[in-house]
Amino acid sequence: MPGPAQQGQMTAQQANMAARNVVTMNAVKRTQQIFSETVDLSQKNEVRISPRNAGLILGFIVNVRTTVDVAASTGTPLTLTPFGPANLLSKIEFDDLNNNTRVQTSGWHMHFVNSARQGRPYLSNFQLDDYPIAYGSNWRELMEGTASIDRDESGTANASWFVPLAYSDKDLRGALYANVVNATASLKLTLNPNAVQSRTAQGWQEAVYTTTAGGTPPVDVTQNDVVVEVYQVYYDQLPKGNGSVILPMLDLSTIYEIKNTALQGLVANQDFSIPYSNFRDFLSTFVVYRNRVNDTAGSLGFINESDVSRWSLETANYTNIFDVDPRYADMWARQTFQTDPPLGVFYFPTREKPISTQQYGNMNLVIDAADVQTGAALLVGYESLALSNVIAQAGSFSTGS
């Protein structure tokens, strides 16, 4: 028999599950536009959106569209980078009603989280050869990037993201009850001011387009105004019982975090640790090994296939939960996305059995890099769950060196 404390915890979990089911079966799911603006990047590159204080917020749909022009006579052609239009946003940030920063990450990381949640590249579709009905990429505005833009041409870059607050429509961990009048939340989007970069510039992979021309932005390239649209997805007309709104209180006490950081200081053929913060359950980790900082050869990648020797997940007592060749990380990504991510992007799925830093203590993802170029960096994206009443005790994410 479980003790009284365990019985109480079981009762809370059962009550939460019952309330969750009542909400998802009876509430009305709404998707409403809350923001639209055409942004002149010469004036600003940040927009701040205040969510509507209504219902149980599940997340936000963000759409960004722009065009890029190359001059007629002296312009240098542009080429889409491996992350392409996912880099139209350099930062996505959400602060909740209690000033907790739940989301603080890049456009590329949010795209890959969306892809992992969907089980294939986000908003992709299946090409059906020889099928008699015209299925295919008919709505290109959802995700689009002109592959190359020559002189006297214009290209289009469009991207969409779902910024989740709740884990899913049915699993309400992280949902935000916004029916308040005395507090404000904020969604802040930072538009990439360097969407076009020279291929010799450090970090060119975080641009949308790259070119062999110099300068930032490169000469004879014009990035036009950016259209930003935001939709709020939420449950409305929440069910009531005994005169009050029925809410899954454990779900509302949980924060669904999506954050990223950059780490430097790798040394060839030596273990380099990527830390996991305390008091969280980590659902996934994305690591981009940005080793090929300057790329004039035209390969447009992050690494060569031989740049990484091993990956391992290490507990506080130096026990390896896994210790694998990088091909296994490639295998995990392919099994999730049904295709391979860009070379240099590694995916470590722990959704079915989260990395619990409450259970294991300090945990580190360890890379052994065979090749480390000057300026090499790891771009690390975390996806985790945490209880809001203990998250303040957790150590912060490393910000790198």
Image (tube, grey):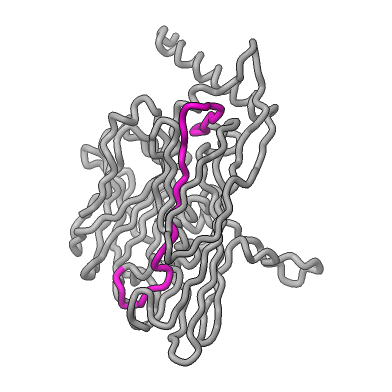
Residue range highlighted in magenta: 173-202
Residue furthest out toward the front: 43
Q: Furthest-right residue in view? A: 132
Residue 9 drawn above or below residue 111? above
Single out the residue that lies furthest toward the bottom.
Answer: 73
Classify the position of the N terminus by image quarter: top left
Residue at 59 percent of width and 32 percent of height: 54
Up the image or down, 367 lies above or below 8; here it is below
Nearest the viewer among 113 and 325 is: 113
Residue 212 falls in image quadrant: bottom left
Q: Give the image quarter of residue 367.
A: bottom left
Q: Which residue is at 39% across, 34% downward?
A: 99
Residue 161 lies, with reference to residue 135, above or below; the image says above
Instruction: Identify the residue at horizontal 21%, vertical 37% (top origin).
Output: 317
| Residue 261 visible somewhere in the drawing | yes
Residue at image location 44% in from the left, 50% down from the top: 92
User: What x and y, as percent, mark residue 324?
Assistant: 33, 54
With 305 as the anchor, is 244 left or right in this view?
A: right
Quadrant in the picture for the C terminus: bottom left
Q: Main secondary structure of the magenta part?
A: loop
Q: Is residue 328 visible?
A: no
Quarter of image, res 98: top left
Left or right, 242 with reference to 381: right
Any magenta on residue 198?
yes
Would residue 45 be counted in the magenta stretch? no
Please give the count of numbered marks on the rendered protein: 0
Q: Position of residue 136 (x, y in %)?
A: 70, 66
Q: Position of residue 379 (x, y in %)?
A: 33, 57
Q: Position of residue 135 (x, y in %)?
A: 74, 65
